[in-house]
Image (cartoon, rainbow, N blue to C red):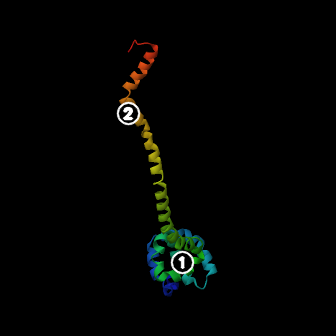
Amino acid sequence: TIYKHVPYEVKVPVDKPYTVHVPVPYTVHVQKLVPYEVVKHVPYPINMFVDRPYTVLVPYEKRVPYMVERPIPYPVSVPVDKPYQVIVEKRIPFTVNKPVPYIVHKPVPYQVKVPQRIGVPVPYPAGSQTEKPFDYNSWRPIINKVSGSKPEYNFYRSENHHGGHKFN
C-alpha cells in the first residue's frame, strides 16, 4: 500500500539512501507511535506522510548528521523538510540541520585554538621562568661547593681566632 501511495511523491531518491541505511531497527520503534498518529491526522496526503514515518523518519533521526547534509541539500531539502518538520522538526531539523553544522564547524575550532594558545604561552613563560629562577638552588650549591672549603675554613678560622689558635 505504501509503494502505491508514494510513487508520484518522488520518494525514490529519498527512499534509496534512507531505506538502505539501517531503517529496520528504527522502523520498529517509530512505526508503533508514529503510524497511528500520522494515519489519523493525515488521511489524505498519506502518500507523503506514510513514507516519512515508515521509512524516512526512522533513518532521518539516526542518519541526521551524515545523510541529512548530503541528500537534503540537493532536491530533497524542500519536499523532505515539509513532511519531516511535522515530527522531526521538534528534535532534528532545528537542532541538527542549522545549529550543528554552523555552531560545531566554526565555533569549535576557534574556541579550542584560542584558549590553548592563550593558556599555553602564558603558563609556559611564567611557569618556566618562575621555576627556572629556581636554579637559584643550583646556583647556591655551586657557590657553596666552589667556595665551600674556603668559607668553612674562614668560619673555623674566625671561630678559632676567637676561641684559640689550636686548629690554626
Image: 70 above or below 154: below
Question: Which of pointers 1 and 2 lies earlier in the amino acid sequence?
Answer: 1
Please state which of residues 80 and 65 is positioned toward the viewer in this rendering. Answer: 65
| Residue at the spot 44% in from the left edge and 71% down from the top edge | 21
**Would you identify the image quadrant in which residue 81 lies?**
bottom right
| Residue at the spot 58% in from the left edge and 77% down from the top edge | 85
Give the percent coordinates (x, y) of residue 42. Answer: 61, 82
Image: 150 above or below 166: below
Disc 1 vs disc 2: Cβ atoms closer than 8 Å? no
Q: Is residue 153 left or right of residue 56?
A: left
| Residue at the spot 43% in from the left edge and 16% down from the top edge | 161
Image: 10 above or below 94: below
Q: Is residue 29 left or right of residue 128?
A: right
Give the percent coordinates (x, y) of residue 76. Answer: 49, 81
Disc 1: CA contacts within 10 A as few (<14), some (14-19) or many (>=20): many
Residue 1 visible in the current orientation: no
Please state which of residues 130 and 99 is positioned toward the viewer in this rendering. Answer: 130
Residue 84 visible in the current orientation: yes
Give the percent coordinates (x, y) of residue 36. Answer: 61, 75
Amino acid type shown at disc 1: Arg
- Outermost residue, left side: 146
Secondary structure of residue under mark 1: helix
Residue annotated with mark 1 = 52
